[in-house]
Amino acid sequence: MSTDAEMQIYGKAAIYLRKSEKERMEAQAAPFDSKNSCYVTDKAELYLKGLVTARADGKCTVTVTKPDAITVKEYHMNPPKYDKIEDMAMMTYLNEASVLYNLKERYAAWMIYTYSGLFCATVNPYKWLPVYDAEVVNAYRGKKRVEAPPHIFSVSDNAFQFMLIGTSFHGWMDGWMSISAYGSQSP
């Protein structure tokens, strides 16, 4: 995980790519009750964080951010250190609620790229973000996936690097055709 100083190479795009060190530390230190924290469905927000106050017959009573308690199906919740996590495959509980909540939280912070194991998920911001300039391309060039925040440039640079060390000409050509636009930008 990069420090704030290391993130400076991404310039003005840094805030759209990774949480600050302060925010990551606060999430690590936040109190969490793993037995009683959960997600609950909500018509307006899709999922909300809640705290189980009672359990009976496979259902539970949950207190959410609003003071009233509701009875719903329980979805296990991840500790706060997983809030806005860059790779959702790292979550303790990988369920629909966890995935959608994480994507929503990252999107709310304009971090539109998120890994899910081998895949890079993108939520369309419907506005231009400064995450596609030459400065950002250069910052991703030659870095391993774990050394940089999630981004399509990381995926394509890694594919390009693997393509260069590949042994098959056919595989090389297929790879080159799919990422030629990225690789053609000069460093």
Image (cartoon, helix red, strand yellow):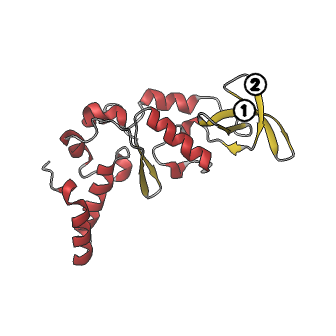
* Furthest-top residue in this view: 67
Count the labels in the image.
2
Amino acid type of the residue that numbered disc 2 sits on in the rendered structure: Asp
According to the image, label 2 marks what residue?
68
According to the image, label 1 marks what residue?
51
Rate crowding at label 1 as few (under 14), some (14 to 19) or many (20 or more) other CA atoms within 10 Å: many
> Along the horizontal axis of the image, is 55 left or right of 90?
right
The location of residue 36, given as percent across then percent down, is 74, 37
Q: Nearer the viewer, residue 45 or 40?
A: 45
Q: Nearer the viewer, mark 2 or mark 1?
A: 2
Q: Please give the name of the residue rendered at 47% of the width and 48% of the height, measured from the top-left corner.
A: 87
> Along the horizontal axis of the image, is 176 left or right of 102?
left
**Mark 2–mark 1 distance (CA, rounded to whole Å):** 12 Å
In the rendered image, which quarter contains the N terminus? top left
Q: Mark 2 vs mark 1: which is more N-terminal?
A: 1
The location of residue 185, given as percent across then percent down, is 15, 51
Amino acid type of the residue that numbered disc 1 sits on in the rendered structure: Leu
> What secondary structure is marked by label 2?
loop
The location of residue 79, given as percent across then percent down, is 61, 38
Quadrant of residue 107 within the rendered picture = top left
Q: Please give the name of the residue rendered at 73% of the width and 43% of the height, measured from the top-left corner.
A: 74
Q: Which mark is residue 152?
A: none
> Along the horizontal axis of the image, is 29 left or right of 117?
right
Q: Nearer the viewer, residue 2 or 185?
A: 185
> What secondary structure is marked by label 1?
strand
